[in-house]
Image: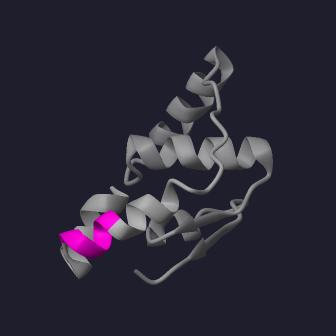
């Protein structure tokens, strides 16, 4: 999604440079448990306009009490979710 949106707006070369920079950030892999699957599914039922990927992000951010930086306005409108819309 990141590469796709960056390529659309700025071109392939900029997207490749940004992808390399993004990969330098330490990433924490979060295993998905059965409890997570249920939570993600309930989010999708409640918020049909969100993609499944967005439901995963929202669920895991809530679980970790993390702030979501997103280009998706729908996420920033969710009550109880710490999210900030960023310009792309």
Q: Nearer the viewer, residue 8 or 58?
A: 8
Q: Nearer the viewer, residue 79 or 27?
A: 27
Q: What is the tally of numbered marks visible in this picture?
A: 0
- Residue drawn at x 53%, y 40% as measured from the top left: 56
- Residue drawn at x 60%, y 62% as measured from the top left: 78
Seen in the image, is 53 located left or right of residue 5? right
Seen in the image, is 63 located left or right of residue 60? right
Residue 79 magenta-drawn?
no
Extreme residue in the top direction: 34
Q: Nearer the viewer, residue 86 or 59?
A: 86
Extreme residue in the bottom direction: 87
Give the colour scheme shown: one colour
The percent coordinates of residue 19 (x first, y second) are 40, 60
* Residue 76 versus residue 29 in the image, above or below: below
* Residue 10 versus residue 71 in the image, above or below: below
Classify the position of the N terminus by image quarter: bottom left
The percent coordinates of residue 39 (x first, y second) are 62, 31
- Residue drawn at x 29%, y 75% as measured from the top left: 14
The residue segment tinted magenta is 12-16
Predominant SS along the magenta part: helix
- Residue drawn at x 46%, y 72% as measured from the top left: 73
């Amino acid at each position: 999604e990141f590469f796709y949106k960056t390529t659309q707006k700025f071109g392939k070369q900029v997207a490749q440079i940004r992808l390399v920079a993004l990969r330098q950030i330490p990433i924490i892999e979060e295993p998905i448990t059965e409890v997570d699957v249920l939570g993600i599914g309930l989010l999708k039922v409640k918020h049909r306009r969100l993609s499944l990927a967005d439901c995963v992000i929202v669920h895991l951010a809530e679980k970790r009490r993390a702030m979501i930086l997103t280009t998706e306005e729908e996420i920033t409108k969710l009550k109880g979710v710490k999210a900030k819309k960023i310009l792309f």
